[in-house]
Amino acid sequence: MERYGRFFLDALKQLLVGSRIYYAWMILLLAAISVGGVAYVRQMLDGLGVTGMSDQVSWGLYIANFTFLVGVAAAAVMLVIPAYLFKVESIHKIVFVGELLAVAAITMCLLFVTVDMGRPDRFLHLFKRFNWPVSMLSWDVLVLNGYLLLNLHISGYLLFKRYTGRPKQTWIYKPFVYLSVGWAVSIHTVTAFLYAGLGSRPFWNSAVLGPRFLASAFTAGPAFIIIALQVIRHLGGFKVDQAAITLLSKIMAICLSINLFLMGCEAFTEFYTDSEHVASASYLFVGLHGANQLVPWIWTAVLLNVTAWVILLNPRWRMDQATLNLACVITIIGVWIEKGMGLIIPGFIPTPLGEVEQYNVTTPEALICVGIWAVGALVYTVLLKVAVPVEAGRLRYPDVGGTGEAKSA
């Protein structure tokens, strides 16, 4: 117990010390969380009527972010597989970056589901009406919370052992590492099935929705990880092998190619067959009966994804830090548009009765989303602020190395 107490004490001290950039970043996040919190209080008092959702379009910005972030969480497997299955040493040193990103992403996912329900107490209805194994929503609750616990256990155990300098017990974490590989795929597959299984929404009734989700996840997730690695390398003094970033950029290139191909297959099927199911795709890509709110957004996403794809396929541009960072940023934006608003909203337009009612994001809705993203960024910052010096060997239990005192970063 003494080691646990010392660990939490040293972690707390670590969080209270930092550069001006660190303090400014934390203040900005806390301010964003406060603004989002105020907006959420208004939503709880006035109801979901303060959002742009309606009886016709009952999912909006909250579920769009949820869908995107499930993929970001699943992308941690892109570090686990090469590190543990293929023994790539350069990746093994940075696995914790992906695992902690998964923890932050799942935290945001659960918050987005909570705010989408209007009041936090309604979250309990998911468990009161736990219709397992028939309900895909029940499966989603299981896999998301299970994946969160898996990553907390793996990263927490390895971090603590690194801090104390004691040998790791393989049986305590290795089985869970291998379990997390399949679990990561399951969380996004189940999310895809949640949409594809809704028979009244033909826009989502596609067998390739699951593969599309995974391809986009393994594109945007590594983009986040590459940016995080460069931040901790330049600001955290953590050595990151360039080979690790190169491998992640190659994974992005392959997965983005698959994502664009599957998106093209979907577009061909919808427009070439020209059945009654083409209405939702028409609304998204060319507009429907004068309603064309999402048309500029989806074509912007296509342009961004294609641009990132061209950059990533060119070895010279992919190896250049500036162009790689550009590709990562526009990939994140492009995938967020395509997989978020570009997937969720058209599924409701037109309605089964043929109504065309567009969805408009309101200010409280946007502020709540900003607040939740700030919570995720805060969680990830806090976790990395402790994990980086421990992994770098700058934060240790007093007995390690015979120094008599814990070293701080």
Image (spheres, grey):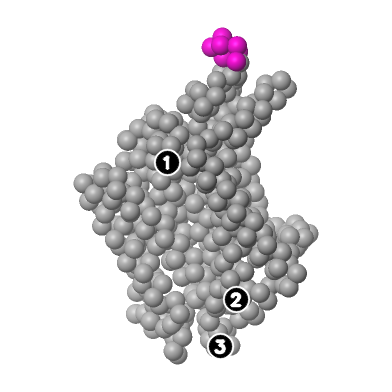
Asked if residue 208 lies left or right of residue 49, the reply is: left
Q: Residue at x 55, y 24 (%)?
A: 408
Magenta-drawn segment: 399-405
The answer for how far apart the CA atoms under marks 1 and 2 are is 36 Å
Image x and y of residue 371, in percent: 60, 58
Q: Nearer the viewer, residue 211 or 151?
A: 151
Q: Earlier in the sequence, mark 3 or mark 1?
A: 1
Instruction: Look at discs 3 and 1 and give the one toward the viewer.
Output: 1
Left or right, residue 47 beside residue 92: right
What residue does disc 2 label? 52
From what the image shows, is residue 55 above or below residue 180?
Answer: below
Identify residue type, mark 3. Glu
Alpha-carbon neighbours of circle 1 within 10 Å: few (<14), some, or many (≥20)? few
Of mark 1 and mark 2, the one earlier in the sequence is 2
Instruction: Name the quadrant containing residue 268.
Output: bottom left
- Image mark for residue 355: 3
Mark 2 vs 3, N-terminal side: 2
Whether 123 is among the magenta residues is no
User: Is residue 404 a member of the stretch shown in magenta?
Assistant: yes
Q: Which residue is mark 1?
A: 231
